[in-house]
Amino acid sequence: MSTRLVRGLFGLLTVLIRSDLSKDVELLVLRQENQVLRRQLGGQPQWGHVDRLWLTALSRLIRRCRWAEVFPVTPAAILRWHRHLVARKWTFTDRRRPGRPGTRRPVKALIVRMAQQNPTWGHRRIQGELARLGYPIAASTVWEILHAAGIDPAPRRAGPTWRQFLTAQAHAIIACDFLVVETVLLKRLYVLIFIEHGTRKLHLAGTTTHPTGA
């Protein structure tokens, strides 16, 4: 793979130092050869990893208006290659382990009994009470146990619903999110954004490769 890439780089340097006429003639010959091969194959060629990397690097040197004439792949194909590359990098197949152990039956029974005896307690209140008793458990797990038992994990108390509250306070609510973006070379970028609920206006706070740095 590295040998083919090095050959391609040397070939590019050779082309750059040649005369314009020689390069134009060679380009016409290669175009004609490409058309003949496409007619004979009758389908799309299969690109290897080195071919995809080489075509992606050369794509930045060609104007978009001429892609359809001289370039064998579309911008959408290059973006699809990048998505597949990112997905293959972050599969974590070597780190996968069997799922976490299930919650013990006595703990499940205790959660259901606490919810039945305290109708106003939600799943987070029950989680806190369990932690006091020495049973560390995630709030999402408590929610799932109550939902499976037919008990509302978040009983509604007096007052407006959550949707009504958000609608009334939307103009004063700002949400934030921390996004992860992969570059073409699989370099991870961290992006901090804020969004105004009332106007749906998005604010880009910053982009960095080291979120814990100064």
Image (cartoon, grey):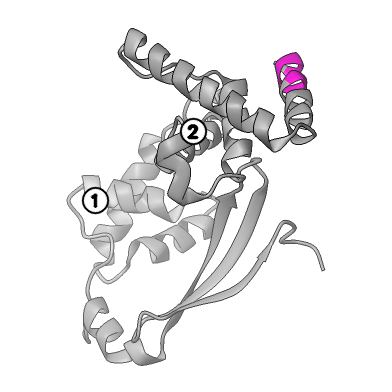
Q: Nearer the viewer, residue 154 or 192?
A: 192
Query: What element does badge 2 sit on?
Result: helix
Q: Is residue 97 visible?
A: no
The mark found on residue 206 in the picture is none
Residue 156: x and y in percent read 22, 74
Outermost residue, front direction?
Answer: 21
Q: Is residue 19 visible?
A: yes
Q: Amino acid at mark 2?
A: Trp
Q: Which span of residues is magenta-colored? A: 2-7
Q: Residue at x 75, y 35 (%)?
A: 16
The mark found on residue 81 in the picture is 2
Residue 139: x and y in percent read 43, 55
Judging by the rendered image, the residue that carries numbered circle 1 is 147
Q: Quadrant of the C terminus?
A: bottom right
Mark 1, residues whose alpha carbon is within 10 Å: few (<14), some, or many (≥20)? some
Q: Nearer the viewer, residue 138 or 192?
A: 192
Residue 11 picture quarter: top right
Q: Is 20 on the left-hand or right-hand side of 79?
A: right
Q: Residues at badges 1 and 2 in contact (C-beta under 8 Å)?
A: no
* Real-space Cα separation, disc 1 to disc 2, in angstroms: 41 Å
Q: Nearer the viewer, residue 92 or 126?
A: 92
43 within the magenta span: no
Q: Nearer the viewer, residue 109 or 36?
A: 36
Q: Residue at x 69, y 37 (%)?
A: 20
Q: Residue at x 45, y 42 (%)?
A: 67
